[in-house]
Image (spheres, rainbow, N blue to C red):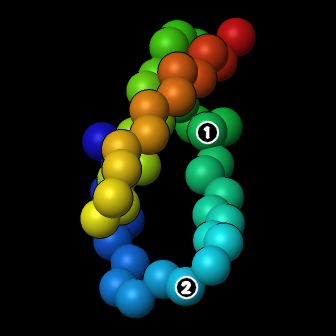
Amino acid sequence: VYRKSEKELNGDSQWTLDLGKLAKGVYILEVTTENSVMRERLIKE
């Protein structure tokens, strides 16, 4: 589990996650803001 919190974000934001050390499989990325929740399925082969 990885968690990152940011205060007072304005406009677009970008982060880079290094998935190199993770085992092959399916992962769920969830981004939560004050107004919405976005979930994406990531597949590492």
Pick whichever, 3 or 39, lies toward us.
Answer: 39
Q: Determine whether 39 is above or below 10 in the image.
A: above
12 relative to 35, above or below: below
Residue in view at x 63 percent, y 71 percent? 13
Judging depth in this view, the residue of 12 and 35 nearest the camera is 35
In the rendered image of this protein, does residue 42 appear above or below residue 31?
Answer: above
- Residue 42 seen in the current view: yes
Residue type pointed to by label 1: Leu
Q: Give the percent coordinates (x, y) of residue 35.
A: 33, 58
Q: Secondary structure at mark 1?
A: loop
Q: Is residue 44 above or below residue 39?
A: above
Q: Nearer the viewer, residue 1 or 13?
A: 13
Which residue in the structure is indicated by mark 1? 19
Q: Which residue is mark 2?
A: 10
Q: Specify the quadrant that holds the C terminus.
A: top right
Q: How many marks?
A: 2
Is 7 left, or right, of 17 in this rendering?
A: left
Query: Going by the picture, which residue comes out furthest to the front?
Result: 35
Callout 2 amino acid = Asn
Q: Position of residue 24 (x, y in %)?
A: 58, 14
* Residue 23 appears in view: no
Q: Quadrant of residue 10?
A: bottom right
The quadrant the N terminus occupies is top left
